[in-house]
Amino acid sequence: MQGLFITFEGGEGAGKSTQIGLLADHLRADGDDVLVTREPGGSPGAEAVRHVILSGAAEPFGPAMEALLFAAARNDHVEQVIRQALKAGQMVLCDRYIDSSRVYQGVTGNLDPDLMRAIERAAINGLMPDMTIILDLPAEVGLQRAHARRGAGTADRFEKETIDLHRKRRDAYLAIATAEPERCKVIAANRSADEIAADIAALVDRLKTSRGLKTKQGIEVAK
Ligand code: TYD
């Protein structure tokens, strides 16, 4: 039985990791085998590349260099970890995936859409998410939360940027959701963690039911 591949997207401070943790708890309580992972990273090769990207070492070489590094990391993660996990029936919850590249490198990095599509195809080799949860938040609120979380610590390569960029990214995520409404679900993230988690759990339970997977209610629908 093939597992489900669910990705989480959104700007800084949208609460992705909290929500991934809560969904993992919900699914485990249902008896699912859950794998929580993240990008860039998630496999030894990709974690090595993560360090290069987030340290800012690749920044002087431009957004195309960064896009290719994200794609290299993603390809390793897909082929070494995600595909096998899905084959083994695991529910794979991934913090960021292709839409982060589309938004951060493609839109705010101003890269050529044809180049971005080619890179994406090579990186994932057909492995599209079954569902993408986009945690949507006004840019100001997300930035405030990210600052609060970071405290006195230093910002990484992607956190140092301006409010304008964050607004563009929010719009770009919403545009992806409009273009791919079957896959992408926009969740208002300016609410309590429990309210958000309940909405996400309902969406995922519905997806499981539609794929013939068991939910807590014991409903099983044939494919
Ligand atoms: P991370 O520390 O994992 O932060 P976050 O909590 O925001 O996910 O840093 C990942 C950063 O890398 C984040 O700012 C978004 C950026 N990124 C891209 O630009 N492109 C990508 O394809 C991915 C996966 C991440």
Image (cartoon, rainbow, N blue to C red):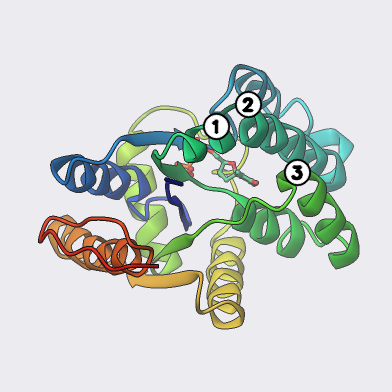
Where does residue 5 sit, x and y in percent of width and height?
47, 50
49 vs 144, left or right, is: right
For the residues labelled 2 and 3, the Cα–Cα distance comes to 12 Å
For the residues bearing labels 2 and 3, Cβ distance under 8 angstroms? no
For the residues bearing labels 2 and 1, Cβ distance under 8 angstroms? yes
The first of marks 3 and 1 along the sequence is 1
Residue picked out by circle 1? 84
* Residue at the spot 37% in from the left edge and 55% down from the top edge: 14
Vertical relation: 195 (above or below) 156? below
Residue picked out by circle 3? 123
| Closest to the observer, 100 or 27 | 27
For the residues labelled 2 and 1, the Cα–Cα distance comes to 7 Å
Q: Nearer the viewer, mark 3 or mark 1?
A: 1
Q: Amino acid at mark 2?
A: Gln
Vertical relation: 121 (above or below) 159? below
Q: Secondary structure at mark 3?
A: helix
Mark 3 Cα-neighbour bin, 10 Å: few <14, some 14–19, many ≥20: many
Furthest residue in direction left, as rendered: 217
Which mark is drawn over residue 80?
Answer: 2
Mark 1 Cα-neighbour bin, 10 Å: few <14, some 14–19, many ≥20: some
Where does residue 104 sit, x and y in percent of width and height?
66, 55
Q: Amino acid at mark 3?
A: Ala
Q: Amino acid at mark 1?
A: Gln
Q: Nearer the viewer, mark 2 or mark 3?
A: 2
